Amino acid sequence: MPEPRRNVELKAVDRDPAATLAAALGAGAQDRGTLVQRDTYFGVPHGRLKLREEEDADGARAVMIAYERPDEPTVRLSRYRLVDVGDPAGTRAALEATCGVRAVVAKRRRLLLADNVRIHLDEVDGLGAFLELEAVVAPDADLHAERGKVDRLRELLDVRDEDLRPGSYADALVPAADPELLAGARAAMAEAYAPYSTLHVGAAVRTDDGRRFTGANVENAAYPQGQCAEATALGAMASAGGRRVQEVVVASELGVAPCGGCRQRLKEFGTAETVVHLADEERVLRTLTLGELLPHAFEQTDLPQ
């Protein structure tokens, strides 16, 4: 299998799009025109997968993009693969049926090129104006030169620390965690009984009628007798008559995802669209759906009739 392509990237809020465009053109960036893009993100267990449908003055095209990139508000390395798509509508329908759609990002992109760095001036529906810098990395490069190019453009375009943004546009479109639910998961994490693993986990679930239930992991010297935080929270919910989970927060020092068994437990009371936020003590690290966490759940319909 060929190695993935690599970019050194940065994403930021664009405080003044007109000034940013003028500064880039004034520095000699080549204007490659405006692109109209529609990115459909699918639910996948690893990395990100999106179908990009794009139009410009030369026509329309589509490409599948699979990539992995740290969710950090800094200059970061992205590894990606591109596959041309001849039937975007059919491909989108097939992936939606099998993987589910996580988010759809629509945007207008002004594309400029400066010293092998792509400058994206984006107007994203529902989010606003953003700036992206992408330096293409040669296969044998050590990233030093590309990071330098991005840093110089960042200074030229007046990109400040507070402008930087983590994650993808799809992440920003996913609903934010319920503050009360997030606080409950973190409070439960602080009370976890984990003398053996030392991994303290708290979970909080919100039901369809708005109630919230929390739980912590409770370990045992006989290891199989321990209980995960998600199971504790679901037990409290079921004891109070709750039967449908709308939102979940799992908090730990490491921001870990639920184990396989707890994904199945959550699916018993949720749907593929139920939102699950993975958090540490400071921030939500990632937001997914149960369908992404457990793409092939065992359902009641799988039981013999």
Image (cartoon, helix red, strand yellow):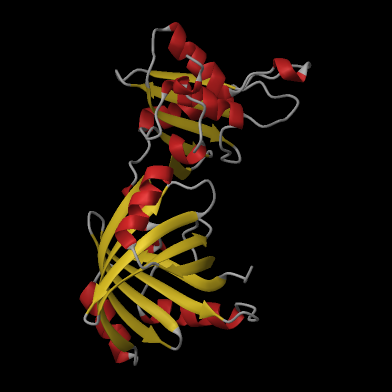
Report x, y in % for residue 68: 53, 59
Instruction: Point out the residue furthest to the bottom here.
Output: 28
**Residue 237 position within the rendered picture, expressed as x and y whole percent measured from the top left:** 44, 13
Residue furthest to the front: 305
User: Is 249 positioned to the left or the right of 86 in the image?
Assistant: right
Residue at 41 percent of width and 7 percent of height: 240
- Between residues 265 and 246, which one lies in front from this camera angle? 265
Q: Is residue 54 visible?
A: yes
Q: With 157 as the anchor, is 55 left or right in this view?
A: left
Residue 47: x, y in percent? Answer: 52, 54
- Name the residue furthest right: 221
Quarter holding the N terminus is bottom right
In the image shown, does 121 or 190 lie closer to the viewer?
A: 121
Specify whether 67 is left or right of 168: right
Count numbered badges in the picture.
0
Q: Who's the residue at 51% across and 18% down the image?
A: 303
Visible residue check, residue 40: no
- Please determine whether, in this image, residue 6 is positioned above or below residue 65: below
Q: What residue lies at 53% left-to-right and 29% top-to-bottom?
A: 263
Residue 226, quarter of the rendered image? top right
- Can you say whether 210 is above or below 297 in the image? above
Kindly indicate the quadrant of the structure image that contains residue 177.
Answer: top left
**Would residue 245 appear left or right of 123 to someone viewing this image?**
right
Q: Is residue 115 above or below residue 11?
A: below
Residue 159: image x %, image y %?
A: 38, 71
